[in-house]
């Protein structure tokens, strides 16, 4: 089983002057779910090389077992430091694709033509596509058979109230919850910060950082 994980290359939080990037747990937890299942994992990002970690995701209160494991894993660190350029990736080399969140993807991957085409290639080939937290933002320009990919699908993603809690409602280019609804997705959510993942056909979405493991496990079931 070959799994592609796509990370953001974007490190600026809008015009706040603060840094952003990908959320470490949303990479580390799925990475080890996949690794422990014996999957081959390839990491990619728009610019290649080391993607920016959102420093907030590595604060003391946000530490998890998967993150601790990552910090003791030189091979995983080396893989992350050397992500492949997204433009060099071909969907037919992989069984599925997983997009971790963090706020970074809202600015680069959401509107990246290479990423959009890649997701469409996976989906059109009958392969599952998964995204967690702000990851579902990468779907907002993706189409399937001429319609938004999320139209009529049960989906989830970072909630408006979670965005409010982190005080970035007016910073992000759009709100994940609102956008998924606008596109015709059948948006659902659990309580803020609780694990919640939805599978609808070949589309898997997770609500927030706590949903990373569940989304990764659901993806394995589909691919397996």
Image (spheres, grey):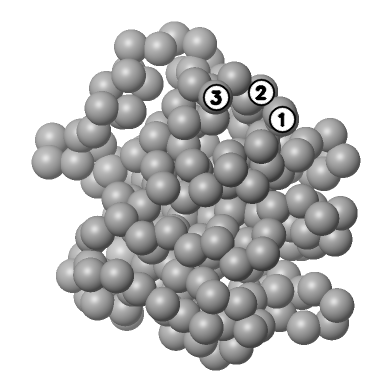
Q: Against 44, is 192 above or below?
A: below
Secondary structure beneath label 1: strand
Measured as percent of width and height from the top left, residue 30 is found at 46, 37
Residue at 41%, 77% (x, y): give it.
188
Q: Is residue 27 left or right of residue 182?
A: left
Q: Residue at x 41, y 32 (%)?
A: 28
Instruction: Name the quarter where the N terminus is drawn.
Output: top right
Residue that carries the numbered disc 2 in the rendered image = 40
Label 3: how many Cα within 10 Å (few below 14, some 14–19, many 20+): few
Residue 50 in view: no
Q: Is label 2 or label 3 in front?
A: 3
Q: What's the CA distance linking mark 2 and mark 3? A: 9 Å
Q: Is residue 117 above or below residue 67?
A: below
Q: Nearer the viewer, residue 1 or 177?
A: 1
Q: Are marks 1 and 2 in contact (CB under 8 Å)?
A: yes
Instruction: Give how far across and how far down residue 218 sits, in percent.
Output: 52, 48
Residue matched to label 1: 2
Q: Nearer the viewer, residue 37 or 133?
A: 37
* First of labels 1, 3 by sequence position: 1
- Across and down, in percent, residue 144 comes to 80, 73
Q: Disc 1 to disc 2, how far (Cα)?
A: 5 Å
**Tag of residue 37:** 3
The mark lying in front, picked from 1 and 3, is 3
| Direction from residue 4 to residue 185 in the image, left or right | left
Q: Secondary structure at mark 2?
A: strand
Q: CA distance from mark 1 to mark 3?
A: 11 Å
Task: Relative to 130, say whether 6 is above or below.
Answer: above
- Rendered location of residue 150, percent (x, y): 63, 76
Residue at x-position 49% and y-position 42%: 217
Marked residue nearer the N-terminal end (1 or 2): 1
User: Quadrant of the image for the C terminus?
Assistant: top right
Image quadrant where residue 163 sits: bottom left
């Amino acid at each position: 089983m070959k799994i592609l994980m796509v990370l953001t290359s974007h490190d600026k939080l809008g015009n706040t002057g603060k840094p952003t990037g990908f959320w470490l747990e949303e990479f580390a937890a799925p990475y080890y779910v996949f690794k422990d299942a014996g999957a081959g994992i390839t990491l990619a990002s728009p610019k290649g090389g080391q993607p920016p970690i959102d420093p907030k995701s590595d604060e003391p209160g946000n530490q998890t077992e998967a993150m601790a494991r990552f910090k003791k894993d030189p091979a995983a660190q080396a893989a992350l430091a050397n992500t492949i350029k997204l433009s060099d990736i071909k969907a037919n080399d992989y069984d599925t694709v997983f997009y971790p969140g963090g706020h970074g993807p809202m600015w680069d991957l959401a509107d990246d033509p290479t990423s959009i085409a890649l997701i469409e290639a996976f989906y059109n080939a009958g392969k599952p596509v998964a995204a967690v937290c702000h990851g579902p933002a990468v779907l907002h320009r993706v189409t399937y058979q001429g319609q938004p990919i999320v139209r009529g699908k049960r989906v989830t993603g970072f909630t408006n109230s979670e965005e409010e809690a982190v005080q970035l409602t007016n910073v992000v280019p759009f709100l994940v919850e609102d956008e998924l609804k606008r596109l015709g997705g059948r948006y659902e959510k659990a309580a803020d910060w609780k694990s919640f993942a939805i599978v609808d056909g070949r589309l898997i979405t997770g609500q927030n950082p706590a949903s990373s493991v569940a989304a990764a496990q659901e993806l394995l079931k589909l691919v397996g």
